Image: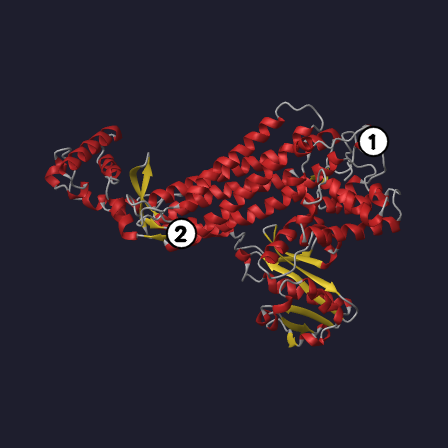
């Protein structure tokens, strides 16, 4: 193992303690794919600057693609290398494959601008995934709300019963909190959309690098404007940690509500066995462990945020080794938040509500005392006096162990002679709810209205919007990566690295709703005879709205314009393609070049895909 900085030193330390203290590979290995991606882009930039020949650039690109395969197939090899950091590992592996040319790649580049770029790319990808997980929790809450518009539930202040609600209203409260979380995470993407690469160690690079083109190649909106700021800026990391801290606070509050609602004292909801455990001593126990851990892990995310704020608070410009501490805090917080979002979704989807018990609780606790006060206000009694009268009536009813509506008219009239028999409908539970017929209130009309609007916001839908399908651009890269990798994890397609995706970006189209990428697909051309529709994916919440059909039609039209004879789909949903004019075929009829790609599929030995063919020339012009 050799360091990237040893020339200045007569001795390079082999002190194991110092290496354990100094080396960052045990955690920055997570940036491996991003480091390869930036290296591919840097090699191209050096070629445009005249530093690398076409042949040298091609050799570097080929070797870097080999490293991507190691990263995907055997990440343990990275950790076992003993290198100082991920940049050292990449360079060391390049030198093994292309000799001294691997050392030439670092021309004009510093680890400072390299890691700053890697980290921005990682944060952007993480944000896209966190957004998808946040939306999933919102959809789970909307599904629960849909089922409980008419479920009456006790509302609390100070953990004392206050006024009755609809349980759907409670669900929508957390949908609103998560909506604000989504906007904060989206702002992190916007604020990190600048490329530091080309800033050097702190003063810029001495080579003729086109930083604007370099930024576009990597999918950024623009390059950073100041080299000194570029290598020392971690605001976007702090913003993400802050956004996640707020989001974890929201999840923790929801968890606390549900823990109480599921307690023996309340018993309003029951949690699934999948998110609870039992006691090792008491067989009757059903402990809300998942929710308690969500509540507990909130402190971890807070700790990551405070840790990085403290690390950065007194750092001089530009880069300092202290900044190495940003990654462990970031990685840990994102991992915890992502896990808690997924567990929250699972917990919410399996909740069952005891409607009768919740309704009885809503009726108790004198939650209709405000209605008595409002009734008296309607009789021209000043509110402060009406409030006092209602309080005395509650004290009397409590002493009698009766509800307000159980008091006789004579008993009520002792508190004020204007109270008549028309008070009783006012004290009824339904009246308490329906009277609050204001925007954001708990009347049935308002809750249904709010639920409908929330669904449209969360699902990105608008009654007047038009479906948009267009060719992909570099700005779509983070969202395409998130989509492709989501469905790769589900076993529906093969994973694609960012570098690989960018090099084939011209193959991709995207479907958009309200300016957001909700689906993607690619047309990969094998030869003049056949192309394949690949990487077709739509976020689950947008399925069934026509995006898949529109993208496939768009690609088939592209194939026709290119003069291709056949368009192939290897799919687990043959009926979908059959409805679009594809016909079934035998896999054995496919060219060897097509089948060769199957060797990378994890389901190669148990393939459940169907081959369907579309003939563009058969379509009428």
* Residue 342, horizontal then vertical, whole percent: 50, 49
Task: Answer whether residue 469 is visible to the viewer in this image.
Answer: yes
Residue 467 shows in this picture: no
Which residue was labeled with disc 2? Answer: 145
| Residue sticking out furthest to the front | 15
Looking at the image, which is closer to me, 400 or 385?
A: 400
Count of numbered labels shown in the rendering = 2
Q: Nearer the viewer, residue 136 or 179?
A: 136
**Percent coordinates x, y for residue 281 in the rendering:** 33, 46
In this picture, residue 476 sits left or right of residue 573:
right
Q: Residue furthest left?
A: 410
Q: Residues within 10 Å of mark 1 (few under 14, many from 20)?
A: few
Q: Is residue 492 left or right of residue 366?
A: right
Colour logic: secondary structure
Residue 577, percent from left and from top: 61, 70
Q: Quadrant of the N terminus?
A: top right
Which mark lies nearer to you, 1 or 2? 1
Query: Where, by quadrant of the figure, is residue 188 drawn?
Result: top right
Q: Which mark is residue 89?
A: none
What residue do we see at 59% from left, 40% from top? 331
Mark 2 burial class by Cα count in 10 Å: few <14, some 14-19, many 20+? many
- The disc label shown at residue 7, or none: 1
**Residue name at image x 62 percent, y 54 percent:** 485
The correct choice, above or below, for 20 with respect to 571 in the image is above
467 and 61: which one is in front?
61
* Mark positioned earlier in the residue sequence (1 or 2): 1
**CA gap, disc 1 and disc 2:** 65 Å
Instruction: Compare residues 8 and 117 and report the one nearer the observer.
Output: 8
Q: Dividing the picture into quarters, in which one does residue 441 lie? A: top left
């Amino acid at each position: 193992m050799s360091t990237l900085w040893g020339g200045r030193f007569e001795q390079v330390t082999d002190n194991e303690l110092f290496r354990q203290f100094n080396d960052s590979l045990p955690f920055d290995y997570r940036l491996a794919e991003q480091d390869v991606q930036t290296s591919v882009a840097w090699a191209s930039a050096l070629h445009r600057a005249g530093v690398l020949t076409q042949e040298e650039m091609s050799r570097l690109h080929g070797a870097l693609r080999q490293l991507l395969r190691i990263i995907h197939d055997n990440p343990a090899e990275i950790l076992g290398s003993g290198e100082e950091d991920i940049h050292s590992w990449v360079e060391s592996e390049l030198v093994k494959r292309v000799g001294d040319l691997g050392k030439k790649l670092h021309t004009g580049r510093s680890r400072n601008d390299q890691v700053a770029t890697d980290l921005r790319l990682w944060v952007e990808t993480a944000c896209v995934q966190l957004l998808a997980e946040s939306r999933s929790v919102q959809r789970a809450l909307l599904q629960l709300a849909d089922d409980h518009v008419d479920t009456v539930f006790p509302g609390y202040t100070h953990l004392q019963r206050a006024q009755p609600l609809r349980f759907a209203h409670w669900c929508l409260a957390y949908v609103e909190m998560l909506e604000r979380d989504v906007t904060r995470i989206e702002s992190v993407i916007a604020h990190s959309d600048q490329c530091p690469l080309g800033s050097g160690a702190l003063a810029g690079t001495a080579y003729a690098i086109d930083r604007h083109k370099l930024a576009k190649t990597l999918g950024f909106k623009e390059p950073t404007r100041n080299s000194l700021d570029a290598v020392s800026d971690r605001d976007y990391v702090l913003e993400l940690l802050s956004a996640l801290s707020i989001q974890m606070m929201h999840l923790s509050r929801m968890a606390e509500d549900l823990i109480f609602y599921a307690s023996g004292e309340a018993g309003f909801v029951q949690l699934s066995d999948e998110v609870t455990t039992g006691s090792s001593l008491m067989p009757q126990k059903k402990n809300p462990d998942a929710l308690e851990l969500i509540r507990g892990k909130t402190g971890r995310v807070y700790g990551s945020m405070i840790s990085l704020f403290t690390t950065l608070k007194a750092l001089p410009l530009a880069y300092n080794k202290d900044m190495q501490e940003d990654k462990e805090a970031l990685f840990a917080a994102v991992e915890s938040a992502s896990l808690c979002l997924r567990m929250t979704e699972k917990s919410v989807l399996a909740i069952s509500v005891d409607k009768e018990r919740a309704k009885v609780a809503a009726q108790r606790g004198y939650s209709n005392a405000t209605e008595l006060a409002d009734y008296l206000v309607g009789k021209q009694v000043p509110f402060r006096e009406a409030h006092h009268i209602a309080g005395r009536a509650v004290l009397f009813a409590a002493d009698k162990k009766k509800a307000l509506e159980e008091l006789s008219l004579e008993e009520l009239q002792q508190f004020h002679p204007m109270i008549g028999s028309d008070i009783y409908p006012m004290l009824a539970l339904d009246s308490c709810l329906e009277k609050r017929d204001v925007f954001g209130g708990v009347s049935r009309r308002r809750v249904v209205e709010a639920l409908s609007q929330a669904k449209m916001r969360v699902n990105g839908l608008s009654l007047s919007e038009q479906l948009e399908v267009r060719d992909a651009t570099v700005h779509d890269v983070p969202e395409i990566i998130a989509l492709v990798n989501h469905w790769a994890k589900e076993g529906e397609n093969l994973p694609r690295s960012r570098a690989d995706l960018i090099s084939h970006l011209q193959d991709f189209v995207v479907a958009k709703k309200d300016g957001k990428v909700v689906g993607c697909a690619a047309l990969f051309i094998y030869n003049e005879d056949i192309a394949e529709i690949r990487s077709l994916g739509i976020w689950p919440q947008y399925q069934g709205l026509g995006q898949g059909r529109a993208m496939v039609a768009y690609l088939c039209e592209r194939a026709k314009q290119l003069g291709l004879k056949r368009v192939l789909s290897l799919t687990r949903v043959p009926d979908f393609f059959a409805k679009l004019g594809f016909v079934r075929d035998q896999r054995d009829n496919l060219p060897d070049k097509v089948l060769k790609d199957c060797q990378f599929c994890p389901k190669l030995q148990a393939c459940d895909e169907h081959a369907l063919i579309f003939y563009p020339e058969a379509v009428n012009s």
